[in-house]
Amino acid sequence: MSDPIYFYGQNGPYACFSNFAPYAFELDGNYWPTVEHYFQAQKFAGTEYETRVQRAFTPKDARTFGRRRDWPLRADWETVKDEVMLQAVRHKFETHSDIRQILLDTKDAQIVENSPFDYYWGCGKSGTGKNRLGEILMQVRAEYQAKSAG
C-alpha cells in the first residue's frame, strides 16, 4: 500500500477532496455550490432553512448555518449523515471528471482528512479520529475502480 494521502483545506494537490472545494453538482433536483452546502442543508431537509443554507455565500457560511441549534435539526440526522455525505461526494466526483481522475490516481493509498479539529470526519489533532470523509472518498474511489475493471 502507498503512503497515506493527507488533505485539509483549500491548499495542496488534494484540496479538491475538501468539502469546501468549489465543485458544484446537482442532486435532489437542486444546484449545490459545494459538498458542504449540500451536507449542511440536509440537516434541515424539507424546511425553509434548507434553502437558506443552499444559498449561503461561502461553504464556511453554509457550515455556520448548519451548526445553528436554534433551527430545527432533523430528528434522524445522526442516522443519515454518513449516507448524506456519501451521496454528495459521489455526485461531486461524478460531475467533475478532472477530480475523479485525481481520486483514481491515488490508487490504493489511504486518504485522510487531516483536520486537527474534527474527530469524526477527519483524523483529529491526535490522529485517532474516525476519518469518515477519508473512508467515503476511498469507497467512492473503489466504486470507480470496480466500474473501470469490468
Image (spheres, grey):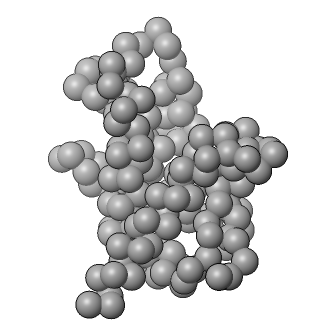
**Residue 124 falls left or right of residue 15:** right
Residue situated furthest left in the rendering: 29
Work out whether 113 lies above or below 80: below
Q: Is residue 75 visible?
A: yes
User: Which residue occupies the extreme bottom position in the image?
Assistant: 149
Where residue 93 appears, x then y in whole percent? Answer: 39, 67
From this view, report whether residue 119 is shown above or below residue 77: below
Give the number of callouts.
0
- The image quarter in which residue 141 lies: bottom left
Quarter that holds the N terminus: bottom right
Q: Say which quarter of the image contains residue 26.
A: bottom left
Q: Is residue 77 above or below residue 23?
A: above
State the residue at coordinates (25%, 51%): 27
Where's residue 63, x and y in %? 53, 33
Q: Is residue 55 visible?
A: no
Give how far across and how far down residue 137 sits, in percent.
49, 63
Q: Determine whether, in the image, residue 137 is placed left or right of residue 73.
A: right
Write the residue at 68% across / 45% down: 129
| 144 left or right of 108 in image | left
Tell which residue pokes out farthest to the right in this image.
126
| Image x and y of residue 34, in percent | 44, 50
Nearer to the camera, 1 or 140 = 1
